[in-house]
Amino acid sequence: MKLLDNKVAIVTGGSRGIGEGIVLKLAESGAHVAFTYVSSDEKARSLEDKIKTFGVNAKAYKSNAGIYADCEAMVNDVVKEFETVDICVNNAGISKDNLLLRMTPEQWDEVMATNLKSVFNMTKQVIRPMMKSKKGSIINMSSIVGMRGNAGQSSYAASKAGIIGFTKSIAAELGSRNIRCNAIAPGFIETDMTHYLKEGEAAKSFLDKIPLGRFGSVEEIANVTVFLASDMSSYITGQVISTCGGLNM
Ligand code: NAP
């Protein structure tokens, strides 16, 4: 018996990086997985095949998490195909870093739509099947930057701080329905998003600030996600789990 046997999970932004790591770890733990992406159909199909090697069902959706109608259509289809939704991981995210003086309204709006409105869009949809089955776990990908702020990342930090407020509010609203809602606040994790941090002098100055002395891996975020998705965390809701090698101390 696996930890997430026969659970149905949705992961936004599951095609690369942390999302891909989460998708594979959920499947390895026994969950059927639906995931979204926006760019490469080929990559999404190949990940779908990889998920199925764990003996679970998989479906990739080209669906923009920042667009309400896309999320509504996606979750409706998942409920039709998989019958319910037990786990929703709101992971899709982008950064358009710029100093405020140079940041355009378009950059601000794009980050807010993809990182924060997406969490509203998806959560509003998945709570219907979760309320029906009287259980559910929603996991939102925040960031330590959402707690500390960071020069040049005001839009990203605001979106990630917004996720924390949303997470705690939904935990309070839906706890009585046995629906839990938590956030993960990763530090620096090795993905396309942080690729530029690994080069030159900048890398050393980042590493010097991390007590564990290294960047994190997608698998380390996926492990926390599986814990929060499973009954192993059945008395945890409204929390932000910092997963950052001690960087937040
Ligand atoms: P990444 O490697 O850039 O991957 C981003 C993922 O999001 C891709 O699967 C991408 O799909 C998808 N995506 C982008 N825009 C989307 C949209 N509008 N709708 C649906 N999917 C969309 O990023 P990552 O580093 O894995 O980050 C994943 C999450 O963790 C983000 O929320 C990020 O803010 C958060 N985070 C990351 C770090 C870190 O150090 N990496 C730290 C703290 C928090 P395509 O492949 O189709 O483009």
Image (cartoon, helix red, strand yellow):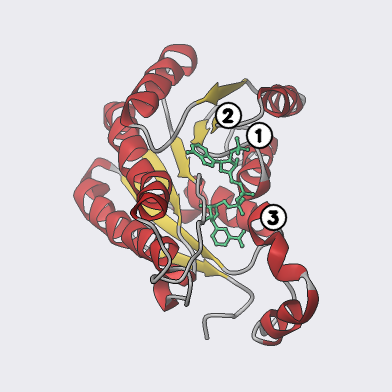
The answer as to whether callout 2 falls within 8 Å of ligand 1 is no
Residue under circle 1? 27
**152 in relation to 220, above or below:** below
Q: Residue 209 carries which label?
A: none
**220 in relation to 63, above or below:** below
Residue 26 position in % (x across, y down): 62, 39
121 sits left or right of 86 in the view: left
Q: Do the residues labelled 3 and 2 touch (CB within 8 Å)?
A: no
Q: Residue at x 24, y 41 (%)?
A: 177
Q: Do the residues labelled 1 and 2 touch (CB within 8 Å)?
A: yes
Q: What element carries label 3?
A: loop
Residue 175 position in % (x across, y down): 26, 49
Q: Which residue reaches farthest top? A: 80
Residue under circle 3? 191
Nearest to the observer: residue 235 or residue 98: 98
Label 3, label 2: how many angstroms apart (C-alpha)? 21 Å
Q: Are marks 3 and 1 in contact (CB under 8 Å)?
A: no
Q: Which residue is drawn at 37% across and 49% down?
A: 106
Would you call the spot at circle 3 few (<14 residues within 10 Å), some (14-19), or many (20 or more)? some
What amino acid is labelled 2 in the image? Val
What amino acid is labelled 1 in the image? Ala
